[in-house]
Amino acid sequence: MIFMSRLRGERFLTETTQNYEVHPPRQRWTHLALIVKDINASIAWYEKHTHMSLLSRTEDENGYGAWLGDPSDPAQADSPFILVMAQFFEGKDPFAPANHGILGPFAHIGIEVIAREDIDRIAETAKQEGCLALPPTQMPPPIGYICFLKDPDGNNVEFSYDQGVYEEARKIWGSHDNAS
């Protein structure tokens, strides 16, 4: 989490400092970042309710960091998209005094599932755990059949079936794999 120290001016990195040897061959979408109050609770929640699992975990003088992603997707190695979480220690938030917002009511993380029944199952589990924000609802195209859950920090996570993001991207950009 060196960037956090850099923002606070506590640690200076020169313009030529490079931490990694391998870089993407082109500009790409890599992550969505959330501030969390309890990183352990957030990791556990996302691992239970989504397809993501822990990729990396860090700690420095400013707080904790975690990266979660989809290890079952072979494309992740060449085109990773991860959820980044940060929990700052008291007095170490580099963005203070700004308040950190949550994703909602419309802003959300969207996950498309493979079957309509997945929405019902996910919603039932979330209802039992008290984190169901919107029960299964059939919305007009292109939205599809959805439900919303609240993560431990109150961020909205949408699960959708028949939303069409996957189909539209393959139709317009083409498939880069052998999957159907």
Image: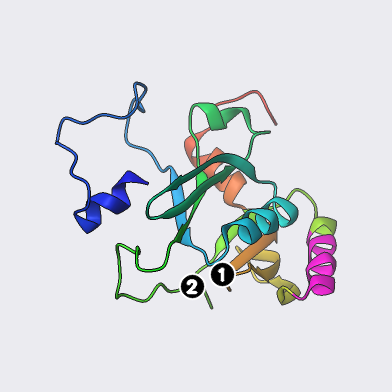
Does 40 sit above or below residue 124?
above
The one nearer the camera, 163 or 22, is 22
Q: Is 65 on the left or on the right of 154, as rendered?
A: left
Main SS, magenta residues: helix
10 Å crowding of disc 2: few (<14), some (14-19), many (20+): some
Q: Reply yes or no: does residue 170 show up in magenta.
A: no
Taking the spot 32% from the left edge, 36% from the top edge, the residue there is 27
Q: In this view, does 27 lie above or below 22?
A: below
Q: Are marks 2 and 1 in contact (CB under 8 Å)?
A: yes
Circle 2 residue? 102
Task: Please indicate whether residue 147 sits to the left or right of residue 6 in the image.
Answer: right
Q: Find out whether residue 126 is within the magenta segment.
A: yes
Is residue 58 visible in this depiction of the protein? yes
| Amino acid residing under circle 2 | Ile
Residue reaching furthest to the left:
15
Above or below — where is 6 with respect to 176?
below
Q: Is residue 163 visible?
A: no
Name the residue: 60% across, 25% down. Answer: 177
* Amino acid type for the residue under numbered disc 1: Asn
Name the one closer to the observer, 153 or 69: 153
- Which of disc 1 and disc 2 is earlier in sequence? 2
Residue at 57%, 70% in the rendered image: 153
Tell me the number on the disc at residue 132: none
Read off the magenta span: 119-130
Distance between the Cα atoms at labels 2 and 1?
5 Å
Is label 2 in a helix, a strand or a loop? loop
Q: In which quarter of the image is residue 88?
A: bottom left
Give residue 83's position: percent from left, percent from top. Answer: 52, 50
- Identify the residue position indicated by label 1 in the image: 155
Q: Residue at x 60, y 63 (%)?
A: 142
In the displayed structure, does residue 144 sit left or right of residue 63? Answer: right
